[in-house]
Image: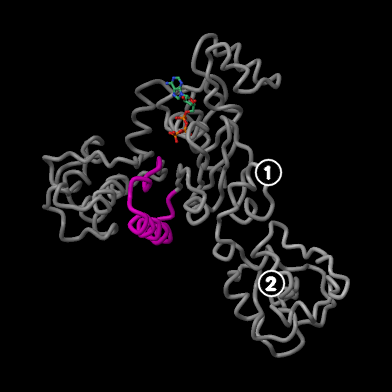
Amino acid sequence: MSSRLEAEHLYKVFGRRPGDAVTRLEQGADRDELRDDGTTAAVIDASFSVEPGEIFVVMGLSGSGKSTLLRMLNGLLEPTAGHVRFDGQDMTALGDRELRALRANKISMVFQHFALFPHRSVRENAAYGLSVQGVPRAERERRADEALALCGLAGWEDSWPDELSGGMQQRVGLARALATDADLLLMDESFSALDPLIRRDMQDQLLELQKTLKKTIVFITHDLNEAMRLGDRIAVMRDGRIVQTGTAEDILVRPVDDYVASFTKDVDRSRVLTTGAVMDPETRGDEADCDCPTVTPDTPFTELCALSARLSHPVAVLSEDGELVGVVRRQRLVGFLGDRQGAPEPCGNPSVPAHVDGKVTARA
Ligand SMILES: Nc1ncnc2c1ncn2[C@@H]1O[C@H](COP(=O)(O)OP(=O)(O)OP(=O)(O)O)[C@@H](O)[C@H]1O
């Protein structure tokens, strides 16, 4: 199966002599050095691929280059160097007309500000992308109504946008993107303008829809918690560069540097981690011989903790085939909630041995 979307050594430089700037960046110059010459390296050497049905989140602080990257992915901005491939087709080699057709039929955007037409009904707003495609009226209304129903807006089709709350308006934006049947959704801070509770609700709704629709989604956010909730994989951007790409667990448990680690400080680890991240793969081989409940590497951390609290011995981890693949000691669980590696440290008190499982387990 080939990737749906690929970025290959993408650069976007604003300012004078962008080609020269790329050469300097390839030779190791950084953003600040170029800025002295009045040149902005918005995106530097970004490479990644997004698989069909995947939610790929690009996360970074303001100015890190996320929006510029997204605009290159949908062909609105021409890369200074590098390639974007959609289903293997090099978008950077397409002419304007072909690009417009690709955007109208295969790619949908969901923006932070819903930009609904105030004098068109909710149905007409949701059908907008279809009217751009030239779909006949009856069919586009039917498809718009279906998309609105998917987004929880059945019964609101004939309303005006100003009769809807902010969250509902954002759902219309999502329905508009879904109505076109485009496989690739590009979502730029789509939920950032919403109140926290509504934002969470929209995240849940997107995850729920994704279970059946299995779209390919690139989701831009500056919020790591949102990135971790939504992303199958996350790319962390800093100063124009992607500094790490990985699952939420990778970013949390194996940050590539202190910068990425500093992002994860406030993340609720218990919501992100799964058993695979905390298990010890070294086993004696007989840990699963009793009749106690077991877990798999995908078991959520909270479930694992609940089970561990009930057992007097380490929890056995079995693969889907029932093979013993690891064990989880309670001591290690406690470590993972508080510290990056989850490794127990000596406490400095000579009367309390640091690695006595029994004692630490009893307290946990
Ligand atoms: N058209 C442009 N001309 C010059 N510089 C630009 C242009 N567009 C973006 N930049 C610069 O490129 C850098 C990356 O901007 P970009 O908007 O992609 O970042 P971002 O991560 O999306 O930020 P935000 O979250 O604030 O939107 C910034 O320094 C920005 O000022």
Q: Amino acid at mark 2?
A: Ser
Q: Residue 252 colored magenta?
A: no
What mark, if any, has residue 207 been given in the picture? none
User: Is the residue marked 2 within 8 Å of ligand 1, measured from its CB?
Assistant: no
Relative to 223, is 166 on the left or the right? left
Q: Position of residue 224 (x, y in %)?
A: 52, 49
In terms of image quadrants, where is residue 348?
A: bottom right
- Comparing 182 with 267, the one in front is 267
- Calculate the distance from the C-alpha at mark 2 to the C-alpha at mark 1: 33 Å
What mark, if any, has residue 258 been given in the picture? 1
Q: Would you name the residue on which mark 2 appears?
A: 319
- Seen in the picture, residue 113 relative to 228 is either above or below; the reply is above
Q: Secondary structure at mark 2?
A: loop
Residue at x-position 62% and y-position 75%: 304
Residues in magenta, as a range: 187-215
Main SS of the magenta part reads: helix
- Farthest-out residue, top: 17
Q: Secondary structure at mark 1?
A: helix
Relative to 224, is 244 on the left or the right? right
- Comparing 80 with 341, the one in front is 341
Instruction: Tell me the quadrant of the picture where the C terminus can be found.
Output: bottom right
Q: Residues within 10 Å of mark 1 (few under 14, many from 20)?
A: few
Residue at x-position 61% and y-position 11%: 20
Q: Position of residue 49 (x, y in %)?
A: 57, 40
Q: Residue 213 colored magenta?
A: yes
Q: Residues within 10 Å of mark 2 (few under 14, many from 20)?
A: few
Residue at x-position 21% and y-position 41%: 116
Q: Amino acid at mark 1?
A: Asp
